[in-house]
Image: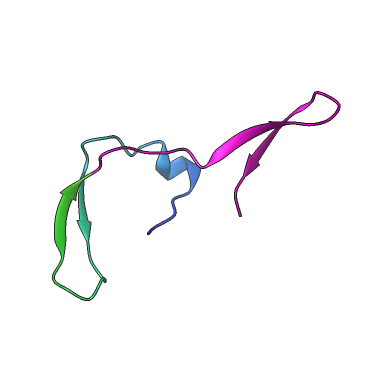
């Protein structure tokens, strides 16, 4: 799995061509099925929205 910076991730679209390599076999070709966001908003006890990312 590769993690992208936000500035890179916004340029990735569903249907984009990909090559999967480094898995122990020959490179595989495929297409991006979906792009899931990793960030989320949590509301604090005071009602303040706080942007968060998983660690």
Q: As drawn, is 32 to the left or to the right of 7?
A: left
Q: How is the image coloured?
A: rainbow
Q: Is residue 19 above or below residue 11?
A: below
Residue 38: x and y, percent? 51, 42
Give, as a single range, the part of the protein colored magenta: 32-55
- How far from the left and from the top, in percent, is residue 36? 42, 39
Q: Position of residue 15 (x, y in %)?
A: 21, 36
User: Does the magenta segment cover residue 2?
Assistant: no
Residue 17: quarter of image: top left
Indicate left or right for 50 with 31 as reference. right
- Quarter of the image with the N terminus is bottom left
> Residue at coordinates 86% horizontally, 26% vertically from top-left?
46
Where residue 25 appears, as percent x and y from the top left, is 17, 73
Classify residue 30 as left or right of residue 49: left
- Number of numbered discs overlaid on the protein picture: 0
- Quadrant of the drawing holding the C terminus: bottom right
Question: Which residue sits at x=79%, y=26%?
Answer: 48
Residue at horizontal 60%, vertical 49%? Answer: 54
In this view, 30 is above or below 35: below
Please tell me whether residue 26 is drawn above or below residue 50 in the rendered image.
below
Which residue is at 22% across, 76% downward?
24
Q: Residue furthest top?
A: 47
């Amino acid at each position: 799995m590769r993690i992208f910076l936000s500035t890179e991730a916004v340029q990735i679209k569903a249907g984009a061509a990909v090559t999967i390599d480094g898995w122990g076999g020959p490179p595989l070709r495929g297409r991006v099925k979906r792009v899931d966001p990793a960030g989320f908003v949590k509301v604090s006890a005071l009602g303040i929205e706080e942007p968060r990312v998983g660690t």
